[in-house]
Image (cartoon, coloured by chain):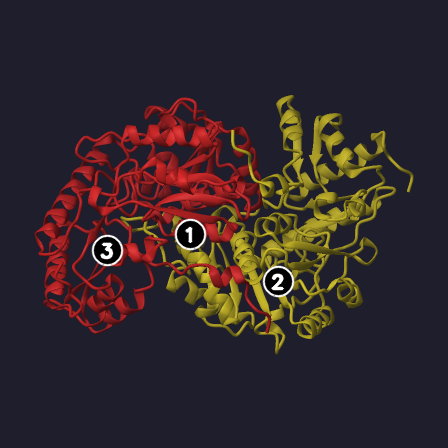
Chain colours: A red, B yellow
C-alpha cells in the first residue's frame, strides 16, 4: 500500500470541529447542545439573495469566467467604491469562498519555505493553507489583557528575516473580535513599506463593527497599493456561508495576473452563487442595521454575563461575532470536552472552541476558549448559565 | 514592491483560454466564432436539477459538513453502486468540482518533488495542480496512429524511479476521447501493484461511451482497493459545469482521513449545488440516452468530416466529447490564431485548442488540435466547413 504524503500527515485537523464526536454523543442521549463553537450564524440570508437563486432562468448551468462573471465583478466594485476602496472590476478576482482567496494569495506571493507573520490567536485555517503551500507561519502573541490589540511593531521586527514575505491580519479579528485602530493600521503600513512585505487583510467581518467604531481597511492607506491583498467573502456579510463565494482584491497587477492562472486551473467559481451575490449588493441598509443591532445585544449579554462569573475575564470586542475569554480551568481543551461528555444543566450543555487551536504557541491559550455569539439572545442566556454551572462543577477548576 | 512567488511564475496559463483575446477581437468586428475550444456543452442541464435549485426552502444559506451533506453522499453511493463500485457514503468526499478532488488527492498522497506519470496528451490543468503541489509530472507519449491507446507498460516502467508515487489516467480521455479497454486497465493494475503506485482515475466523462463499448473503472479491479482514487464531477454528466460539484472516491482510509483535513480547511463544498446534485441522481435514463445519441451523431459528423479534408487525420474516439486531430499545418498554434485573426468564411470562423497545451513535450502536438463537439450538428457542420476552407487558404499549410 502506498504511503500518504508527509504534508498530509502534517496538515492540521480542524480545531473547531474536533470535539464534534462528543457533541454528537451528547445529542444521542437527548441533550440539547448550544453551538458556540462555530461561526455559522443563525441570521437569515437576505431575501434578495435567496430569491435570485429561486429565479434562475438559464437552461445550461455553465462555467463562468475564471475571474468571475463580468457583471458580478462590476457590481461588486460599486459596493467596494461605496466604502472607499477606489477600485475597478479589474482589481477583483472572484473566488470559491474567502478560503480560496487565501490560498491563491499565498500561492501567488510566497514560495515553500517563505515566512508569513500572523498575530496570534489567529483563524486556525491559516495554518492549513500555509501547510498546503509549504509556507512557515511565524506567530506573534497578542494578549487578552489589552483585548488582543496589535502587538508592538518591535515584536514584528524581531521576527523579520530574509524569508519573511507577508503579514496577515484579520480585521475585525476572528477569533478575538478585536478591531484594529487607524494608528495600528498606519503602524502596519510603515512596517510593510520598510521591509517590503505584503499585507494580507482578511476582512470577512468588515460589516460587523460596534459602538460606532470605524473600520479601517489597508485599502484606505495611500502608498500601500502594491502591498495589500484583501480576502473577502459573502459568508458572514449576508449569512451565506454555504454559497462559497469570496474574492481577492488587490491593485498589484502581478498578483492579479498570477492569481488568474491559479483560478484558471480550477476553471470557475460557483455560478449560482455569483448570481445571488450580484443580487445581494442591493440588500438594503436596514438589513445590516438590524443585524448589527442584534449582534451588539448578543455581545453585550455574553460579555457582561461572562465577566460576572467568578474567575472569568472577557474583554469587550469591537467587531466580528466572537470573543476569546479566560476561564478558571486547568486546561480549556479538557474543560470543553468535559462539558460535552460529563456535564449537563437541565439536560443542556455548550460546545465551545478551545483557544489552543488558534495559537501556534498552545501554552498561551490553555485557559481560553473562543465563543461565537451566533445564537439568539434566549439561547445565549441559557448557554451562559450552562457555562457558569459547568465551571462550578468542573473538577479541574482553578481558583484564579 | 514585493515579488510574486517563483511558483506563481512557473504556474502555466490555461492553453485552452489563451487565444480568447483573438476570438474576442473577431467577434468585435462582427464575426461568428464557433467555440470548439472548450468543454462547455450546449446540452441542457436536467430539469430535476434546475428545479431543485428553484425550490430551495432554507432561510439560512449555511455551511454543509466539510465532507458534504450526509444525504447527498448517501444518495451518491446508490448511483455508484448501481454502476458496480461497491462503496458506502463513507468512501465519498464531496469536493468543489472535480478540480478540488484532484488537488486534494495530490496533496494527500504526494509530497513536493514526488513524481506522477501521465500519458500525454493529457488534461492541461493536471500541470497546474501539480505545480501548486510541487509535484513533477512525468509524461509518457501516446500516439494518434493507434488512436492514443495506453502506452506500452514497458514505457511506464522506464520512467519509474524512487520518487514515483502515482499514475493518472483520464478515462474516457480528455483530450483524445480514447476509452481504455479492460486489458489496458488490467495492465495498469499489475503495474501499480508491482511498483506500489497510486492509480488516480479521472472519470469526468464516464457517462459518454459510444458504439456499445464498455467503460472499465479501476473500481472494478479486485486487489487495487488501497491504490485507486477516483476523481468525479457532475459537470459533464449533467451538463452542470458551473455547479462546481465533484467528489473523490477511494476505499483507502488513510486518504479519506487525510483528504478530510484539506476539506476542513476550506470549510464546505457549495450548498445549493449539493441539493441539486442530490436531486440529479433521479435523472431518468432517457436523458442520458438522448444525450449519448446526440454526442454520437456529432462525433460521427465531425470525425467523418475531418477525415474527408485532404491531409487531415482524425481517429474515431470511443468516449468523452473530444477529438485530437492531425492537420496539414506547420504549427497548430499559429494556425488556430490565424483562423481567428486573419480568416473568415461567410463571416464565420472557428476557435480550436492547439494540442501543444496538452503535451509536456510540445513538439509532439505541433500539428494537432483538440476539438470539443459541444455544439449542435448544424453549427458543427458550419465549423467543419470553416476548418476546410481555412486549411485551403492557410499560408503555413504543409502537403503531408
Q: Position of residue B334 (x, y in %)?
A: 77, 33
Residue drawn where x is 13% and y is 63% of the image: A391
Q: Nearer the viewer, residue B287 or B394?
A: B394
Residue drawn where x is 67% and y is 28% of the image: B22
- SS label for mark 1: helix
Q: Nearer the viewer, residue B290 or B295?
A: B295
Give the quarter of the image for residue A159. Answer: top left
Against B304, residue A153 (above or below) is: above
Q: Is residue A238 visible?
A: yes
Residue under numbered circle 1: A127
- Which chain is indicated by disc 2? B
Residue under numbered circle 2: B201
Q: Position of residue A328 (x, y in %)?
A: 16, 59
Q: Nearer the viewer, residue A395 or A12?
A: A395
CB under 8 Å between callouts 1 and 2? no
Against B258, residue A89 (above or below) is: above
Measured Cα–Cα span from mark 1 to mark 2? 30 Å
- SS label for mark 2: strand
Residue under numbered circle 3: A368
Q: Position of residue A337 (x, y in %)?
A: 25, 67
Q: Residue furthest bottom?
A: B223
- Which chain is indicated by disc 3? A
Measured Cα–Cα span from mark 3 to mark 1? 19 Å
- Which chain is indicated by disc 1? A
Give the quarter of the image for residue A140. Answer: top left
Against B197, residue A195 (above or below) is: above
How many numbered badges does the structure rendering display? 3
Judge the density around disc 3: few (<14), some (14-19), many (≥20) Cα neighbours within 10 Å. Answer: many
Measured Cα–Cα span from mark 3 to mark 2? 45 Å
Residue drawn where x is 38% and y is 44% of the image: A118
Q: Are marks 1 and 2 on the same chain?
A: no
Q: Nearer the viewer, mark 3 or mark 2?
A: 3
Amino acid at each position: 500500500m502506498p504511503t500518504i504524503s508527509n504534508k498530509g500527515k502534517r496538515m492540521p485537523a480542524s480545531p473547531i470541529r474536533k470535539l464534534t464526536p462528543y457533541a454528537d454523543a451528547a445529542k444521542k442521549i437527548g441533550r440539547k447542545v448550544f453551538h458556540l463553537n462555530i461561526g455559522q450564524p443563525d441570521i437569515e440570508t437576505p431575501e434578495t439573495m435567496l430569491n435570485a437563486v429561486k429565479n434562475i432562468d438559464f437552461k445550461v448551468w455553465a462555467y463562468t469566467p475564471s475571474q468571475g462573471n463580468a457583471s458580478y465583478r462590476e457590481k461588486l466594485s460599486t459596493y467596494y467604491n461605496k466604502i472607499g476602496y477606489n477600485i475597478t472590476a479589474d482589481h477583483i478576482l472572484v473566488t470559491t469562498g474567502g478560503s480560496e482567496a487565501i490560498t491563491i494569495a499565498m500561492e501567488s506571493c510566497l514560495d515553500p519555505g517563505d515566512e508569513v507573520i500572523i498575530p496570534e490567536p489567529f483563524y486556525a485555517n491559516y495554518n492549513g493553507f500555509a501547510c498546503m503551500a509549504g509556507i512557515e507561519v511565524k506567530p506573534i502573541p497578542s494578549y487578552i489583557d489589552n483585548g488582543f490589540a496589535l502587538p508592538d511593531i518591535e515584536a514584528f521586527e524581531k521576527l523579520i528575516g530574509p524569508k519573511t514575505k507577508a503579514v496577515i491580519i484579520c480585521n475585525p479579528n476572528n477569533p478575538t473580535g478585536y478591531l484594529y485602530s487607524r494608528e495600528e493600521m498606519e503602524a502596519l503600513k510603515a512596517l510593510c513599506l520598510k521591509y517590503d512585505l505584503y499585507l494580507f487583510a482578511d476582512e470577512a467581518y468588515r460589516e460587523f463593527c460596534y459602538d460606532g467604531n470605524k473600520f479601517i481597511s489597508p485599502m484606505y492607506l495611500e502608498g500601500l497599493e502594491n502591498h495589500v491583498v484583501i480576502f473577502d467573502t459573502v459568508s458572514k456579510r449576508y449569512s451565506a456561508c454555504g454559497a462559497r463565494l469570496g474574492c481577492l482584491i488587490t491593485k498589484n497587477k502581478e498578483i492579479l495576473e498570477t492569481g488568474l492562472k491559479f483560478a484558471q486551473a480550477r476553471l470557475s467559481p460557483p455560478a449560482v452563487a455569483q448570481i445571488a451575490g450580484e443580487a445581494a449588493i442591493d440588500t438594503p441598509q436596514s438589513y445590516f442595521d438590524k443585524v448589527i443591532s442584534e449582534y451588539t445585544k448578543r455581545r453585550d449579554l455574553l460579555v457582561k454575563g461572562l465577566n460576572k462569573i467568578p474567575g472569568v475575564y472577557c474583554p469587550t470586542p469591537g467587531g466580528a461575532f466572537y470573543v476569546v475569554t479566560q476561564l478558571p480551568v486547568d486546561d480549556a481543551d479538557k474543560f470543553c470536552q468535559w462539558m460535552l461528555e460529563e456535564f449537563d444543566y437541565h439536560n443542556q450543555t455548550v460546545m465551545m472552541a478551545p483557544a489552543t487551536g488558534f495559537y501556534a504557541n498552545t501554552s498561551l491559550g490553555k485557559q481560553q476558549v473562543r465563543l461565537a455569539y451566533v445564537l439568539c439572545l434566549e439561547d445565549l442566556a441559557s448557554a451562559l448559565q450552562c457555562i457558569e454551572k459547568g465551571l462550578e462543577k468542573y473538577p479541574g477548576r482553578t481558583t484564579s
